[in-house]
């Protein structure tokens, strides 16, 4: 990154957040830029009005400055981490810095312990470097020490004395903007633990902290508020309700409690939307930390409880916009799942497109037993992306495997030859946020011709299916933001993660080819609406390495299976006869009908016709489907 002090060996970058403390910041930057590790440094100026930005540019031109124009709170650290490219990120406040050699030691610990997601450093306070009482609390953690971690396991830390594995930090969404500032570490600690990352206290890594004397106005109220919101987002209902009642009872005599409760109530709808209770193992660890025992030393200014404030980790987040010319806006509400099989080059092109999206979505790749070096190529080129290698070709069920690991509220699918246009994932998430009865939004599809396609090179063209989606004949409720659909195209759709999982995902029987129709009918039967949004765009550059006969065979077979699984007998007969009359009369079609007939026993066993209202929608779609150029089983 041009202009940032670094060496080829720099493995840890430093992110500093600041607001209206220019002189303290300049002193901190002087110490950081003098470190022997020469780390790249990013400063996030949270809307300072004291000339901070100009002073940093003048005194430290080698430091990357993000002047965001408003106070992002702790989420500014996430923005800074996204800007860095180092595998590890250390955080500093404008009144804290790192002792020489500590960042190198932290990098060594991460390299030696692959499960380590966060190093909680020892903190020394003031000009004389006296130990912060939080060190004793962390060292005495009742969680013990795991064999694969370099120090005692913890579920709390000081942000200004922490180093994180960047991929783990960004994978869980960083610091949640909902909490803004004050005790925000607890939520991040829990989310890292929920994803299996270890957090360890490592006293050989040392941060220095020189806070201004005296209390900070409003800090106690913010800590109480964020402790309560964290409970609502990650802990069992009785625990959250009990803490709320305790805060209510404290209000008559405590002004800070009143301010905390009022602020928490305003944020409570957003907190409950992010609710994702921690798994039993993490809840057990929390209860160990909360169990009665000798009162620990109270952490100093800026510290959080060593075992978390009873609360959890970040939920889906959308970061604030970056300044012009700075890093792109991020939106971690949607995870992208890509399935692939023996199409390494197409996949790498798609992953490059996804990695460049301004939303910076988490990406999970499911390699369906490729034999062309796909897995190694993904690990080498995109180490931040999660790679699943089930060892056999699961077809569409590979998407189900990935969906089990998704922690965001929404899920977008891609094939290895398709990608989302910048901004479309955010726009889709906005639609799903605004319309709680909408389960999926399908995008407009633009096809990019290859030289062998017989089309002249140039602008991409609309897939023929788009006109069918746009002109859907289905009636729609007045709140639905676009045409109602009876099905969707997986590689051009964003869905609600919980609804997808509740419906069971894609059927293993169908494997691949028209597998969406059964899923869509089951979602509609559960009361959901599926929609099309013309403002969303997916790009498709069809791979030349396709087997058109196999695709046709599976398409015919799966259409027949779906029809007899979910349609009334007259409708099923009608569609079966139509297919028999219209598909090519060749060995591929004959084999498709034979496979469909062979599956009749399980079809009849699992047959569950859709409700009348859903059947009426499917009936309305029959006429346009018969004349659809996109649904002709040829090839």
Image: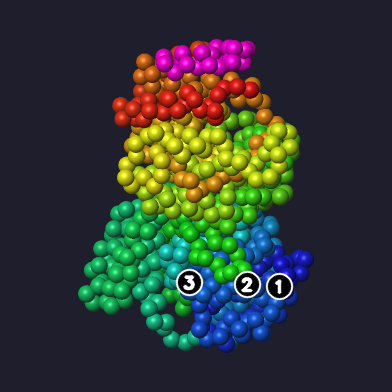
Residue 351 is labelled as: none
Q: Name the residue under label 3.
A: 73
- The residue that disc 2 covers is 42
Residue interval drawn in magenta: 573-595
Identified at 44% across, 53% down, the residue is 430
Q: Earlier in the sequence, mark 1 or mark 2?
A: 1
Dominant secondary structure (helix, strand or loop) of the stretch shown in magenta: helix
| 328 up-or-down from 377: above or below | below
Residue 454 within the magenta-colored segment of the rendering: no
Disc 1 to disc 2: CB gap under 8 Å: yes
Q: Quadrant of residue 484?
A: top left
Can see residue 494? no
Q: Please, what secondary structure does the residue beneath circle 1 have?
A: loop
Question: Foreground residue, 439 or 83?
Answer: 439
- Residue beneath disc 1: 4
Where does residue 2 sit, x and y in percent of width and height?
73, 70
Q: Split into 4 quadrants, where in the image is the C terminus?
A: top right
Q: Count every numbered label the image shows and give the total.
A: 3
Q: What element carries label 3?
A: loop
Query: Mark 2, residues whose alpha carbon is within 10 Å: few (<14), some, or many (≥20)?
Result: many
For the point 51% across and 23% down, the residue is 558
Q: Distance between the residues labelled 2 and 3?
A: 15 Å
Name the spot of residue 203 as percent of width and height, x first.
60, 69
Q: How is the image coloured?
A: rainbow
Residue that appears at 52% across and 51% down: 424
Give the mark nearer the N terminus: 2 vs 3: 2
Q: Quick one: SS at disc 2?
A: strand
* Disc nearer the start of the sequence (3/1): 1
């Amino acid at each position: 990154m041009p202009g940032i002090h670094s060496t080829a060996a720099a493995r840890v970058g430093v992110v500093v957040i600041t607001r209206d403390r220019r002189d303290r910041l300049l002193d901190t930057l002087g110490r950081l830029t003098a470190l022997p590790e020469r780390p790249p440094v990013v400063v996030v100026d949270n809307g300072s009005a004291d000339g901070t930005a100009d002073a940093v540019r003048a005194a430290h031109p080698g430091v990357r400055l993000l002047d965001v124009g408003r106070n992002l709170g702790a989420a500014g650290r996430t923005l800074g981490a996204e800007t860095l490219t180092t595998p590890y990120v250390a955080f500093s406040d404008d009144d804290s810095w790192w002792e020489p050699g500590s960042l190198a030691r932290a990098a060594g610990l991460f390299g030696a312990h692959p499960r380590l997601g966060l190093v909680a450093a020892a903190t020394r306070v003031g000009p004389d470097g006296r130990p912060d009482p939080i060190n004793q609390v962390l060292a005495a953690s009742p969680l013990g020490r795991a064999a694969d971690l370099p120090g005692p396991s913890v579920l709390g830390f000081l942000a200004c004395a922490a180093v994180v594995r960047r991929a783990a930090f960004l994978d869980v969404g960083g610091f949640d903007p909902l909490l803004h500032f004050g005790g925000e570490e607890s939520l991040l600690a829990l989310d890292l633990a929920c994803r299996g990352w270890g957090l360890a206290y490592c006293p050989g890594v040392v941060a220095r902290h020189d806070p201004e004397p005296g209390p900070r106005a409003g800090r106690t109220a913010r800590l109480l508020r964020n402790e309560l919101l964290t409970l609502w987002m990650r802990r069992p209902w009785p625990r959250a309700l009990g803490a709320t009642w305790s805060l209510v009872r404290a209000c008559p005599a405590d002004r800070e409690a009143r301010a905390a409760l009022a602020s928490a109530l305003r944020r409570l709808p957003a907190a409950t939307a992010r609710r994702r209770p921690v798994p039993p193992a993490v809840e057990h660890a929390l209860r160990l930390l909360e169990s009665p025992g000798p009162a620990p030393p109270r952490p100093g200014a800026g510290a959080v409880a060593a075992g978390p404030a009873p609360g959890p980790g970040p939920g889906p987040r959308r970061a604030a916009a970056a300044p012009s010319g700075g890093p792109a806006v991020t939106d971690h509400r949607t995870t992208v799942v890509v399935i692939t099989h023996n199409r390494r080059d197409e996949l790498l092109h798609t992953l490059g497109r996804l990695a460049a999206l301004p939303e910076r979505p988490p990406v999970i790749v499911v390699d369906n037993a490729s034999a062309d070096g796909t897995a190694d190529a993904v690990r080498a080129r995109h180490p931040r992306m999660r790679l699943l290698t089930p060892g056999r070709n699961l077809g569409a069920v590979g998407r189900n495997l990935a969906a089990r690991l998704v922690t965001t509220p929404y899920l977008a699918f891609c094939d290895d030859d398709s990608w989302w246009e910048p901004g479309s994932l955010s726009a889709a998430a906005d639609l799903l946020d605004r319309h709680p009865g909408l389960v999926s939004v399908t995008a407009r599809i633009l096809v990019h011709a290859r030289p062998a396609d017989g089309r002249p090179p140039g602008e991409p063209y609309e897939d023929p299916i788009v006109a069918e989606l746009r002109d859907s004949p289905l009636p729609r409720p007045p709140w639905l933001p676009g045409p109602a659909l009876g099905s969707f195209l997986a590689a051009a759709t964003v869905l609600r993660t919980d609804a997808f999982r509740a419906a069971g995902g894609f059927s293993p029987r169908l494997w691949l080819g028209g597998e969406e129709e059964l899923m869509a009918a089951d979602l509609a039967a559960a009361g959901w609406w599926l929609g099309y949004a013309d403002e969303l765009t997916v790009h498709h550059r069809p791979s030349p390495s396709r087997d058109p006969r196999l695709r046709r065979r599976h398409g015919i077979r799966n259409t027949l299976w779906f029809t007899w699984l979910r349609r009334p007998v007259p409708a099923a007969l009608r569609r079966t006869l139509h297919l028999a009359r219209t598909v090519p009369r060749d060995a591929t079609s004959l084999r498709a009908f034979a496979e469909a007939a062979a599956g009749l026993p399980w079809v009849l066993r699992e047959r569950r016709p859709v409700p009348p209202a859903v059947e009426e929608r499917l009936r309305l779609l029959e006429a346009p489907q018969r004349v659809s150029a996109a649904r002709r089983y040829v090839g």
